[in-house]
Image: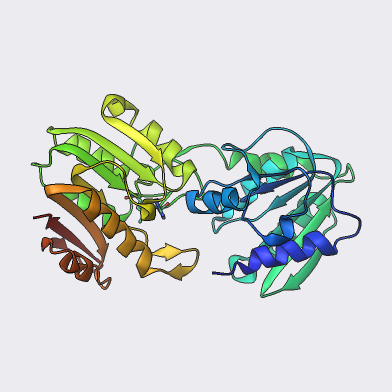
């Protein structure tokens, strides 16, 4: 699917005065052919499928946000307000004196509001509008309001999920609360779950923590998650179960290499803004392939999502074990 904010960012990159800088950092990096000629381009991307696409395109990538200074830092934010402001501050920290900060966002994600935020911090912003997106460019002239960037930097501090000891950070799935679907699954987990378990799309670790607390016979849980930031939070949230857990930055749609006695999931069904049923179906297909004979699959989904058809096409026995007005919990067994 074409990413229009990325297209707009590339336009801004080429249309802004002057030649391309001798090196560039790209925060939220996504591959694009227009980047091919760019010298010394380094990308950081927390989402595994996008990081894989970046690698396949042959660009250099840093596993963590790198330290250093660049004459140009590009930022392609996701959907979270706090994370977007945090990324502006992280980009600022990595900008060499006189350098350029380039950002692009869809109008529907509040691009003009964020442009005003950058203007408030930097004084002057040039912008272009295209593809229902906005790209804005600020050049460091030594007069930026560092107090504003300092406020935005604080948004990166880990925060507690209300009423719990779990920590999260902005931008990850359900960063402010326990997802109600996952809560329904957690309260209906069969106590008899045992052996080796996988948690697919594990987020910040809520389901794995609930399963380890409820089911004494679970010997190990592998947490698979595409978002490196969420996985870092999960590692902290499951520290008390360190000997029973392992964490995998992994695109679940590519399948799993281990086999399991049980698999838990609250599958994603959005790619960016759009509903993507195929993503949930691919999760279920990967899970079924990785289950041992007699293995159990526990999944929660919005009631209207037709995942039962996948279970039937693979001949799994399934039943609904709980539901509420929004969600259903399905228990399936591999025969
Ligand atoms: C509905 S959330 C559930 C999160 C967590 N299990 C919970 O209960 O809070 C789905 C999770 O799947 C992750 N995800 C999305 N696409 C993925 C993929 N291709 N591979 C692995 N994880 C993915 C998302 O980052 C998100 O954390």
Reply above or below: 194 against 18: above
Q: Is residue 113 visible?
A: yes
Residue 162: x percent and y percent?
37, 44
| For residue 12, side relative to residue 182 (left or right) | right
Quadrant where the image shows the C terminus: bottom left
Q: Is residue 184 visible?
A: no
Residue occupying the point 31% across, 43% down: 257
Q: Quadrant of residue 118?
A: bottom right
Residue 113: x percent and y percent?
68, 63
Residue 170: x percent and y percent?
51, 47
Residue occupying the point 26% across, 37% down: 221
Reply above or below: 262 against 53: above
Residue occupying the point 75% across, 72% down: 129
| For residue 325, side relative to residue 249 (left or right) | left
Residue 185: x percent and y percent?
21, 53
Residue occupying the point 88% across, 41% down: 142
Q: Quadrant of residue 250?
A: top left
Quadrant where the image shows the N terminus: bottom right
């Amino acid at each position: 699917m074409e990413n229009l904010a990325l297209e707009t960012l590339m336009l801004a990159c080429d249309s802004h005065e002057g030649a391309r800088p001798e090196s560039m950092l790209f925060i939220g990096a996504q591959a694009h052919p227009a980047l091919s000629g760019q010298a010394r381009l380094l990308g950081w991307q927390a989402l595994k499928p996008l990081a894989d696409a970046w690698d396949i395109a042959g660009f250099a990538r840093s596993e963590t946000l790198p330290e250093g200074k660049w004459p140009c830092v590009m930022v392609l934010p996701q959907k979270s307000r706090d994370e977007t402001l945090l990324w502006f501050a992280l980009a600022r920290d990595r900008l060499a004196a006189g350098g350029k900060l380039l950002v692009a966002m869809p109008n529907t994600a509040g691009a003009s509001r964020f442009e005003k935020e950058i203007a408030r911090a930097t004084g002057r912003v040039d912008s272009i509008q295209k593809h229902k997106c906005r790209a804005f460019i600020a050049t460091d002239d030594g007069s930026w309001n560092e107090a504003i960037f300092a406020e935005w930097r604080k948004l990166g501090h880990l925060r507690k999920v209300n009423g719990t000891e779990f920590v999260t950070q902005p931008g990850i799935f359900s960063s402010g609360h326990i997802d109600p679907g996952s809560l329904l699954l957690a309260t209906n987990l069969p106590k008899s779950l045992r052996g080796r378990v996988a948690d697919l799309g594990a987020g910040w670790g809520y389901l794995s923590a609930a399963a380890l607390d409820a089911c004494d016979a679970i010997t190990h849980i592998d947490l698979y998650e595409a978002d490196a930031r969420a996985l870092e939070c999960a590692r902290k949230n499951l520290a008390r179960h360190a000997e029973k857990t392992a964490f995998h930055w992994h695109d679940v749609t590519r399948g799993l290499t281990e086999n399991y006695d049980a698999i838990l999931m609250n599958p994603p069904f959005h790619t960016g803004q759009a509903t993507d049923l195929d993503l949930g179906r691919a999760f279920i297909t990967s899970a079924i392939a990785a289950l041992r004979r007699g293995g159990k699959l526990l999944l929660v989904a919005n009631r209207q999502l037709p995942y039962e058809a996948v279970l039937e096409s693979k001949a799994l026995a399934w039943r609904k074990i709980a539901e509420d007005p929004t969600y259903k919990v399905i228990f399936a067994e591999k025969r």
